[in-house]
Amino acid sequence: KIVYKIKQDAVGSRVITWGSAFRETAAGTLPVLSTTAAYVDIVGFVYDSAVSKWNCWASKLGFAS
């Protein structure tokens, strides 16, 4: 398992590109992170060794810091 805590800088509008090792949730998408300055997003993945991929299992987006 791995959990990422990602915080926007003071400018905001930064984006992340998930690599090919990351797979979407059951809903069919990977999280689109907040772009508001100083906001925090938390995203969790579990590794599936059968397919060598990180499966997204949870995300909580848009915490004001």
Image (cartoon, rainbow, N blue to C red):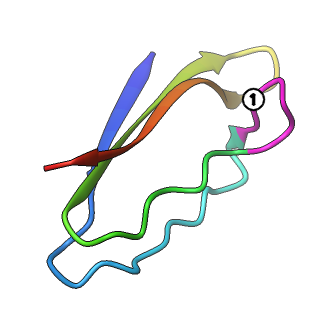
**In the image, what residue occupies the spot 22% across and 85% down?**
11
Q: Establish if 13 lies above or below 52.
A: below
What are the residue bounds of the magenta stretch? 23-29
Left or right: where 12 falls relative to 2: left
Q: Residues within 10 Å of mark 1 (few under 14, many from 20)?
A: some
Compared across the picture, whether 3 is left or right of 27 comes to: left
Indicate the quadrant where residue 34 lies: bottom left
14 and 48: which one is in front? 14
Residue at the spot 19% in from the left edge and 73% down from the top edge: 9
Q: Nearer the viewer, residue 15 or 53?
A: 15
Give the residue at x 72% y 28%. Answer: 52
Q: Pinpoint residue 65: horizontal percent, then vertical percent.
A: 13, 50
Q: How many marks?
A: 1
Residue 58 located left or right of residue 64: right
Residue nearest the viewer, comparing 50 with 3? 3
Is residue 28 part of the magenta span, yes or no? yes
Magenta-colored segment: predominant secondary structure:
loop
Q: Position of residue 17 (x, y in %)?
A: 59, 66
**Residue 50 sits inside the magenta stretch:** no
Amino acid of disc 1: Thr
As displayed, is residue 59 above or below residue 5? above
Quadrant occupied by the N terminus = top left
Position of 29 with respect to 36 (left or right) is right
Residue highlighted by disc 1 = 25
Rendering coords of residue 38 (x, y %): 19, 64
